């Protein structure tokens, strides 16, 4: 993903830590697909977000991953980043950060602070993910 000039022990450690968090939150399949689709143009960005977002923010240790997940989902929904919102909804359910009932409360909070259209869209985006999660859980 990077040239030898970009590889130092400190950077490799940030990359390893970031990948571990990224995989834990979004799942191996998503991360493998994102990394596998990268090329000489996009690989440096994959490294950048892994080191700076996943290691630099998510792995800071001040907030737990559940709290970061709540903040992230709310921010993504408020800004209309629905693909990423859906990824984080799936991660929050899969990792046990939120129950479907708690996810509904995130949507209710969005209605109060970001507006009903945002909350309605968040509910619409989350519904198939919740349904799939509940089906998998019951089988």
Image (cartoon, grey):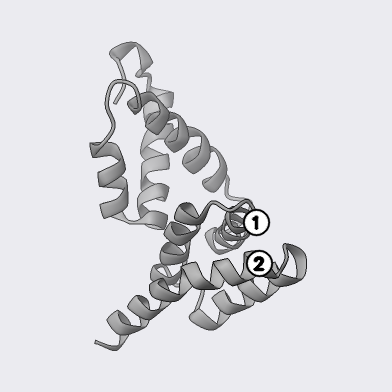
Query: What residue do we see at 73% from left, 66% from top?
Result: 115
Give above or below for 114 relative to 76.
below
Quarter-of-image position of residue 35: top left
Quarter-of-image position of residue 103: bottom right
**Residue farthest top in this picture:** 5
* Along the viewing direction, whichever of 136 and 9 lies nearer the viewer: 136
Residue that label 1 marks:
78
* Along the viewing direction, whichever of 32 and 17 lies nearer the viewer: 32
> Marks 2 and 1: which is nearer the front?
2
Q: Position of residue 117 (x, y in %)?
A: 65, 67
Q: Is residue 97 visible?
A: no
Dots 2, 1 in contact, CB < 8 A: no
Give the spatial CA distance, label 2 vs label 1. Answer: 10 Å
* Along the viewing direction, whichever of 42 and 125 lies nearer the viewer: 125
* Along the viewing direction, whichever of 44 and 85 lies nearer the viewer: 85
Q: Position of residue 10 (x, y in %)?
A: 43, 25
Quarter-of-image position of residue 77: bottom right
Name the secondary structure under disc 1.
Answer: helix
Residue that label 2 marks:
117
Give the numbered dot on residue 38: none
């Amino acid at each position: 993903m990077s040239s030898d000039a970009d590889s130092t022990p400190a950077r490799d450690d940030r990359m390893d830590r970031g990948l571990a968090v990224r995989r834990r939150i979004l799942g191996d399949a998503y991360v493998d697909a994102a990394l596998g689709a990268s090329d000489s143009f996009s690989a440096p960005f994959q490294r950048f977000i892994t080191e700076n977002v996943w290691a630099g923010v998510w792995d800071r240790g001040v907030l737990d991953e559940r709290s970061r997940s709540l903040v992230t989902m709310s921010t993504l929904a408020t800004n209309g980043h629905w693909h990423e919102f859906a990824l984080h909804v799936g991660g929050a359910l899969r990792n046990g950060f939120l129950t479907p009932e708690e996810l509904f409360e995130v949507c209710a909070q969005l209605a109060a602070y970001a507006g009903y259209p945002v909350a309605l869209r968040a509910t619409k985006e989350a519904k198939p993910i919740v349904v799939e999660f509940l089906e998998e859980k019951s089988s």
